[in-house]
Amino acid sequence: MKTSDFDFQLPEELIAQTPLEKRDASRLLVLDKHTGETEHMHFYDLPMLLRPGDCLVLNDSRVLPARLLGHREPGGGAVEVLLLVDRGGKVWECLVRPGRKVRTGARLSFGDGLLTAEVTQVLDNGNRLIHFEYEGIFLELLEQLGKMPLPPYIKAELNDPERYQTVYSREVGSAAAPTAGLHFTKELLKQVEDMGVRLAYVTLHVGLGTFRPVKEEDILDHEMHSEYCMIPAETAETINRTKREGGRVICVGTTSCRTIESWAAEDGTMKESAGWTNIFIYPGYRFKVLDGLITNFHLPQSTLVMLVSALAGREHILSAYQEAIERKYRFFSFGDAMFIH
């Protein structure tokens, strides 16, 4: 399979720059993974598509306000730092701009010196290891000084940072939002639960690798990024019970899908798990647990388009995407949603 097999032409004006006023007012394209048939609804119609005994798996990761704007000392040249991975001991792996000016030993300052840092190493991939120095609690400082790390295709500023968080986000650690969950309101979740659908939570901290394009022409040559994820015992048991009783396991987002598929046994059973995953799901993959997927519309030639193609077939996905483009659906992080069942 070639990367170009997963290409499509997307008009730039369909890339959503801001979230809708109401989270669940987004449109919902419903795709039958076996027949390729589509329906057009709104996200608030989701309860009509669910059944008592189904289980929704949601990623409760919360986005770190991981974008720090500061300057180099001395000299005062502007610098932007994006926190990627907590390496422990106040050291983070970071993406830095402008990279050529920020070498090993460079001193950085943020928020009038509330937070200072030193670059301790330049890694082979160009990322930096940075040691931070501060008083108090790092997460509280980030809430004060940091900005939301919006994807590169979003040019607009975000008025309310909470709109780039799901209403059920709890575990801080993502560099990007698990965006399929942005469509849920607390009221919609309660409505779904009241009708007998189980809610089960996993945590996968989304890395920036999720936006990394596939550069190799043969998709099997692509090296997948690693992300940390956790499945609590309660979630594992809820999924197992759902399967035993004939319900469907429906993942909200590709991150939830990758989490449960990473740790499922061959027979589809789950147990409490935690660790790093670099699972790469593409056509030919046999899903062990997942029956359905709620997801957004993804970038051309991305690993996420390959994942949804593994579930519904490449032809069905590209045909549904073409239909969405013709009907002017909104694409990517703040865009509309798709339910593959």
Image: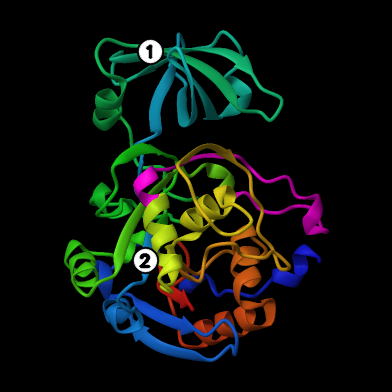
Whole-percent x, y for residue 164 in the image:
32, 52
Secondary structure of the residue carrying tag 2 is strand
Q: Is residue 127 left or right of residue 194?
A: right
Q: Which residue is mark 2?
A: 55
Coloring applied to the structure: rainbow
Q: Which residue is mark 1?
A: 116
As shown in the figure, which amino acid type bears the numbered disc 2? Cys
In whole angstroms, how far apart are the C-alphas of marks 1 and 2? 45 Å
Is label 1 in contact with label 2 (beta carbons under 8 Å)? no
Q: Residue at x 39, y 79 (%)?
A: 28
Q: Is residue 35 left or right of residue 70?
A: right
What stretch of residues is rendered in magenta? Answer: 211-235
Label 1 crowd (10 A; few <14 / some 14-19 / many >=20): some
Mark 1 or 2: the one toward you = 2
Q: Which mark is on residue 67?
A: none
Q: How many marks?
A: 2
Towards the viewer: 270 or 123: 270
- Toward which corner of the image does residue 65 lie, by quadrant? top left
Label 2 crowd (10 A; few <14 / some 14-19 / many >=20): many
Residue 277 visible in the snapshot: yes
Whole-percent x, y for residue 163 in the image:
27, 55
Whole-percent x, y for residue 119 in the image:
54, 14
Whole-percent x, y for residue 35 in the image:
59, 90
Image height check: is 47 above or below 81?
below
Quarter in which the N terminus is drawn? bottom right
Secondary structure of the residue carrying tag 1 is strand
Towards the viewer: 177 or 202: 202
- Toward which corner of the image does residue 41 lie, by quadrant? bottom left
As shown in the figure, which amino acid type bears the numbered disc 1? Thr
